[in-house]
């Protein structure tokens, strides 16, 4: 009889223990699930700060080396507000920036570095075209006035039965020095510093000017123009100048 009572007591206490375990699991389960939802929201970032300019503080127990941080907020605001800055204020700092700002407002696709890459290519093509007398190519890249001057020089050289050999060995620098809008036409002047070899030969092939073994540093100022209303996207050379 005593053994039966002890057996019932064991079953009773086992049921109580199982009930307590289930209750504890339910409480912990609800808490863990809530924390998991918070973790998912954290991965999505703060919708009020889409650029992540506000950085969350590091936990105290993390091994993090703090580096000096830029004032990202100020830099971003300066970049955004640059286009809206009064041109008089920009001009006080850099007149070139005024012209480039005007051009970029007229042509959203204008990009300074891309323009310089194209200008360097045009520089070599025009110099080589002038030396070889390729008037068709020159006519496509030059304004009427500049083309007229180049064509006249080529004709005089041919009349004298002379030939010109020009080699651009290196373009050491190509920098914008002036930019502005005049009506719907944009103008950009580029300063080129290059190493060139120039040789002029007579009808017999003898050198009458220059040295094929000598490279000379040449500084040129070329002005390119483009009518923003034109369907033709190409820029043309409208003026040339040199320090030589």
Image (tube, rainbow, N blue to C red):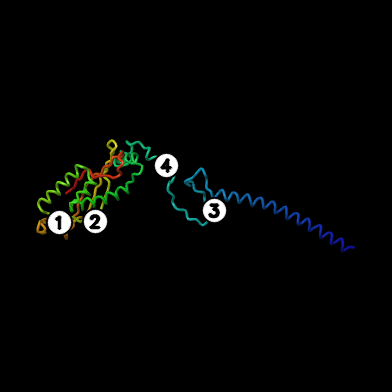
- Mark 1 or mark 4: whose residue is earlier in sequence: 4
Q: SS of the residue at dot 3?
A: loop
Q: CA distance from mark 4 to mark 2?
A: 40 Å
Mark before the other along the chain sequence, 1 or 3: 3
Residue at 81% over, 59% down: 11
Which of pointers 4 and 2 lies earlier in the amino acid sequence?
A: 4
Q: Nearer the viewer, residue 234 or 43?
A: 234
Disc 3 crowd rating (10 Å Cα; few below 14, some 14-19, many 20+) is: few
* Residue at numbered disc 1: 199
| x and y percentages locating residue 192 in the rendered image | 24, 50
Can you give x and y, in whole percent of width and height, for residue 49 in the image? 49, 44
Disc 4 secondary structure class: helix
Separation of marks 2 and 1 at Cα, in angstroms: 17 Å
Task: Give the residue at x 18% y 53%.
Answer: 132
- In the image: residue 179, left or right of residue 200: right
Q: CA distance from mark 3 to mark 4?
A: 31 Å
Position of residue 195 relative to residue 49, above or below, is: below
Q: Is residue 124 left or right of residue 56?
A: left
- Mark 3 or mark 2, which is nearer to you? 2
The residue mark sitting in front, 4 or 2, is 2
Disc 4: CA contacts within 10 A as few (<14), some (14-19) or many (>=20): few
Q: Which mark is residue 60?
A: 3
Mark 2 or 1, nearer chain start: 2
Q: CA distance from mark 1 to mark 3?
A: 73 Å
Q: Which of these two is toward me, 53 or 145?
A: 145
Under circle 2, the secondary element is strand
Q: Is residue 150 left or right of residue 186?
A: left
Q: Mark 2 against mark 1, which lies toward the viewer? A: 1
Determine which of the numbered discs, if any, sits on residue 77 in the image: 4
Q: Which residue is mark 2?
A: 170
* Dot 1: element: strand
Which tag is nearer the camera, tag 1 or tag 4? 1
């Amino acid at each position: 009889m005593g053994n039966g009572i002890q057996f019932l007591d064991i079953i009773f206490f086992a049921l109580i223990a199982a009930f307590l375990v289930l209750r504890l699991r339910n409480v912990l389960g609800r808490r863990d699930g809530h924390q998991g939802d918070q973790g998912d929201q954290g991965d999505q970032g703060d919708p009020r700060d889409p650029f992540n300019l506000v950085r969350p503080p590091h936990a105290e127990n993390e091994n993090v080396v703090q580096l000096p941080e830029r004032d990202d907020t100020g830099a971003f605001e300066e970049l955004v507000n640059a286009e809206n800055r009064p041109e008089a204020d920009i001009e006080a700092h850099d007149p070139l920036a005024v012209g480039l700002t005007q051009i970029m407002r007229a042509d959203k696709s204008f990009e300074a570095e891309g323009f310089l890459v194209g200008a360097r290519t045009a520089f070599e093509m025009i110099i080589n075209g002038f030396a070889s007398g390729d008037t068709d190519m020159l006519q496509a890249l030059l304004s009427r006035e500049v083309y007229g001057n180049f064509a006249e020089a080529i004709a005089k050289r041919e009349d004298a039965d002379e030939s010109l050999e020009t080699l651009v060995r290196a373009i050491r620098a190509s920098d914008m020095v002036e930019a502005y809008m005049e009506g719907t036409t944009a103008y950009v002047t580029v300063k080129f510093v290059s190493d060139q070899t120039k040789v002029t030969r007579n009808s017999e092939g003898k050198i009458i000017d220059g040295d094929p073994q000598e490279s000379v540093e040449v500084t040129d100022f070329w002005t390119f123009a483009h009518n923003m209303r034109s369907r033709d996207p190409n820029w043309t050379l409208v003026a040339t100048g040199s320090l030589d």
